[in-house]
Amino acid sequence: MARVRQSGTSGELIVRRLLRAHGIRFQVKAKNLPGTPDLVNRGVKWAIFVHGCFWHAHRGCPRWKIPKSNSSFWREKFRQNLARDERKRKELKKLGYSVLTIWECEIKQETRGQNKILNFINRSQPVEEQNEASKSHIDPDATPKLLPPPRETYHYTDSGRYVSRLVMLNDREKAAKRLYTRTLEYDTDSGRVFDRAYLRLSKRSESNTDGPSVRIADLFSGCGGLSLGTQEACSALGHRFKPLLAIDNDVESLSVYKSNFNPATAHTGDIRRFIDGKLGDSPTVNEKMLLRNLKNLDILLAGPPCQGHSDLNNHTRRKDRRNGLYERTGRFAEIARPTHILIENVPNVVHAHDRALDRTIEHLLGIGYDVDTGIVDLSELGVPQRRRRHVLVASLGKFISVKEVCARYRVSNVRTVRWAISDLEREEPGFIFTEPGKHSKENSRRINYLFEHDFYDLPDRFRPPCHRNGHTYKSMYGRMKYDEPSQTITSGFGCPGQGRFIHPTKRRALTPHEAARLQFFPDYFDFTAVKTRSALANMIGNAVPMKLAYVFCLEFLLAQSSKRLR
């Protein structure tokens, strides 16, 4: 029982996000009030308890029942819990507070839980404020609220020879129109043509240098997928991309980052050497040195190591010592105070035993950030692979919804493997970036069998013994389908035994160039600093497709467009 979470539970975080989204002010964990309510507004005098159904004995709920083992102990335990909860409610009411208990099962029923909370807040306000507050009441029978028009539109120009992107800002077109490249064939989806033209750019287009600067820091930067998306968001709005700091423990990845972005400062090594203070403490000597040139930071990007959470990690999954590195992003936010934060990881980060994600969220909320989290399917944003990521976004003075951002930028047509790499079929090998890996005789026989029989999945009898008889590794040794998105690109994309990485029409696995395209790296992105195939595979497979950072950082910049960027 000592391990039962007392604060910052998932239910509490959901309620906090709801209240923040509706502009409702509150205090967390009022310890000097009876029962330490989870959420309190002292001015209006209301208090909310977010109760777990089991521990607080929610009668009639299937989540609560008396355990069969030692039932007399549990029956008395629940009786005491119920009596204590009722006593605290009465004490709060004597102090003039309106009190609401919201149950775990009610939160799971999204509309019901939201209505119960907002109706309670509405009733608790002074009469003259209730009419205004009632506007935020969610009526389940009402017509769903429509999202605003898309931020960006795409148009053919010059008789269809070129395609351009226009970004909308406050009901008008932003004067940051960019002309990309000549289209090869007509497509009714001009956005799809634009993205393909972007991927095939051999030279980066110069962006407007007269706009305001956007100052960013990239922690766990890798080769720079998040920074690439941020750079493109800046370009779309005519802002200047100004990377002040990059930190990564991989020398070769950081060398690629530096050759592409030229950050003011780049550090190689364990991030705990540079951000070594505890949450809530004053900056350490090392942290003060790190902060010397980081004033007025606009955006913090971070991709903490995800291998410890991955389902492919059968050794230290959920308990990997690297999982706690996530919390260093919260510490950096505390001492550097960036205006916006974007952190990405694998979906399973929510299950880590060390609760680093929960502690980071709770800490960010406590230091004044509006926080939201969600799972993003990158294929819905135009990335030609099925890749799902957990995203945390946080901003000072502005709540940004992960769900709404994804809905706003969802593409109407998914991008396929053919769309991304078909033009590379006849690419001449040269630098390791364009060369496929060499396969063993056994793997070559497996690849030939797939093509000779026009199969996409290898029969069990041709697999290694560990992949036979009821296995769950169907995609291993699999052939990709040209007209579907690829599976998640990993660092094993050059090996058939690591996933569905056999080329759709060529008897080989993917080249690094093809994997980079599927990861949404444009052709102008410079990987020449990499000397070994394994290092190249690791940095491409571990990268974040730039589309993720592009859509969220575009929202960040548009949200603060009324403020002067430095």
Image (spheres, helix red, strand yellow):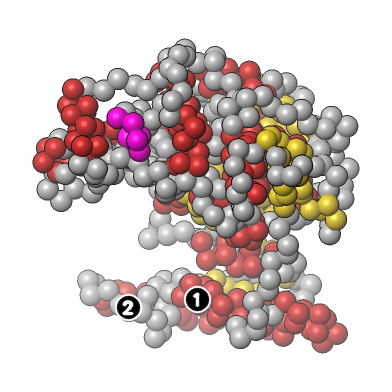
Residue 135: percent from left, percent from top:
76, 79
Residue 57: quadrant of the picture: bottom left
The location of residue 386, given as percent across then percent down, is 44, 48
Looking at this view, is 536 or 28 the one in front? 536
Q: Amino acid at mark 2?
A: Lys
Q: Is residue 94 left or right of residue 547?
A: right
Q: Return the residue nearer the eye: 64 or 212.
A: 212
Amino acid on which the number 1 mark rests in the picture? Gln
Give the magenta part as a residue range.
500-507
Displayed quadrant of residue 479: top left
- Mark drawn on residue 109: 1
Q: Is residue 462 above or below residue 113?
A: above
> In the depicted view, which residue is nearer to us: 273 or 486?
486
Q: Residue at x 75, y 82 (%)?
A: 134
Q: Which residue ends up furthest to the front in the rendered image?
A: 159
Res. 492 visible in picture? no
Vertical relation: 95 (above or below) 300: below
Residue underneath mark 2:
65
Which quarter of the image is occupied by the N terminus? Answer: bottom left
Residue 112 in sight in this render: yes
Mark 2 element type: loop
Q: Nearer the viewer, mark 2 or mark 1?
A: 1
Q: Earlier in the sequence, mark 2 or mark 1?
A: 2
Q: What residue lies at 46% left-to-right and 59% top-to-bottom?
A: 5
Residue drawn at (79%, 72%) of the image? 43
In the displayed structure, 16 sits above or below 348; it is: below
> Magenta region, mostly helix, strand or loop?
loop
Residue at the spot x=41%, y=19% of the render?
A: 435
Q: List x then y, in percent, for residue 405.
A: 64, 56
Neighbours of disc 1 within 10 Å: few (<14), some (14-19), many (20+): few
